[in-house]
Image: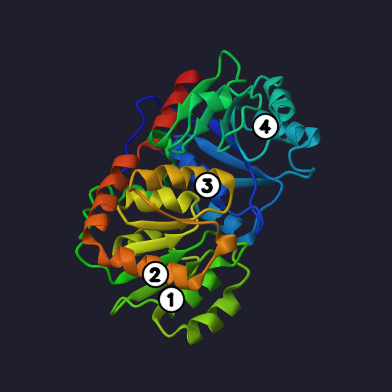
Amino acid sequence: MVASLRVPVPGKSLVVRTDASVTIGTGHVMRCLALAQAWQDAGGRVVFAMAETTGAVRARLGSESVEVVSIEAQSASARDAGQVGEVARMGKADWVVLDGHFSVGYQSELKSSGLKLLYLSDDRSSERCVADVILNQNSDATGDMYAEREAYTRLLLGTRYVLLRREFLAWSRYKRDIASARALLVTMGGSDPDNLTNLALEALSMVRTEGLQATVVAGGSNPHFDSLQATRTGAGATIQLHRSVPNMPELMAAADLAVIAAGGTLWELLYMSCPVLSFARNAVQRHVLEDLDRGGIVQYLGDPRQFEPAGLAAAIDALAASLKRRERMAAQGRQQVDGEGARRVCQLLAGLN
């Protein structure tokens, strides 16, 4: 069950400024949706202000009773900030959530309107930030990353603040049977701009684990679905290919191990106690995965630009064959992510109103 907030926010509006596209991906939106759901559960209203989005993202937000307002300006510009301020004013919102690359000038523009800011960050740089609260949910987050913050800025750092959507929290009592290693989940995010899913399908033809069955999920904003169907036909392994599934927690629960490309899916799988093999699409993801790999929590597969199908197949076979490694990864996953992050963040914001 989703825990209720101790500090209610009845009628309070929350404005979320973020974007989604095939290039950007959908990760920013999906973690903000988790925060939006927790805010709604406390009795509040949420509006997403977006300069870029996709049809699949807009449909998902609509299904969650989240209003989407279009920003008719260059993303992250002063005009953009002005329009977001107007959305907040019309909605009588105190807080604006920023998830993306928004400069200190952009933040200052909103602050000058009397708004409070929550800035979701993954960056390791020490660029100046004037937000009231900075949230970095990565396992390697430290205060040194934000040395240029203001004296009033609160830091929420680490996996204690991982934002998980409602559909995952329903699995809080789930206990995984780790003995089997025959079900593999492959999912590379909402848009998969590098088409890693296709490369993973090629690798599946080289897997030697007897009886392995793969479930491959392409996100709703993935533009490569037709070619994925063709690759699946020639892959040889037992593969089910899906697009934009409504039951991802169930698929994660059914999987014995998973191959992904980091992002929000990483934290979801850790919460579901599923052993993970993961690529990193950027330096931020690489640092996080290296940190988790050192702890034996995740197996880091490297940069997808050096992707070798045979190497991925060998990694899958090795993890499937090692009950001890999978037991350790499953146990440590839930210890990293307890599912209370969104509730904790909303409780803090409500208390600072």
Q: Which mark is residue 204?
A: 1
Task: Please report whichever mark, 1 or 2, sits nearer to the chain's N-terminal start.
Answer: 1
The image shows residue 215 at horizontal and vertical percentages of 40, 72
Task: Please report whichever mark, 1 or 3, sits nearer to the chain's N-terminal start.
Answer: 1
Q: Residue at x 44, y 34 (%)?
A: 43
Mark pair 2, 4: CA separation: 56 Å
To which residue does mark 2 refer? 314
* Mark 2 and mark 4 residues within 8 Å of each other at the beta carbon: no
The image shows residue 138 at horizontal and vertical percentages of 46, 38
To which residue does mark 3 refer? 285
* Mark 3 and mark 2 residues within 8 Å of each other at the beta carbon: no
Task: Please report whichever mark, 3 or 4, sits nearer to the chain's N-terminal start.
Answer: 4
Q: Is residue 59 left or right of residue 294?
A: right
Residue 189's place in the image compared with 180, above or below, is above
What amino acid is found at the position of numbered circle 1 in the picture?
A: Leu
What amino acid is found at the position of numbered circle 3 in the picture?
A: Gln
Q: Is residue 11 left or right of residue 343?
A: right
Please name which of the two marks, 1 or 4, marks the residue nearer to the observer: 1
* Closer to us: 311 or 39: 311
What amino acid is found at the position of numbered circle 2 in the picture?
A: Ala
The residue lying furthest to the top in this view is 151
Q: Residue at x 62, y 20 (%)?
A: 148
Q: Residue at x 61, y 24 (%)?
A: 131
The image shows residue 257 at horizontal and vertical percentages of 33, 62
For label 3, count other residues whose C-alpha is less than 10 Å away and answer few (under 14), some (14-19) or many (20+): many
Task: Please report whichever mark, 1 or 4, sits nearer to the chain's N-terminal start.
Answer: 4
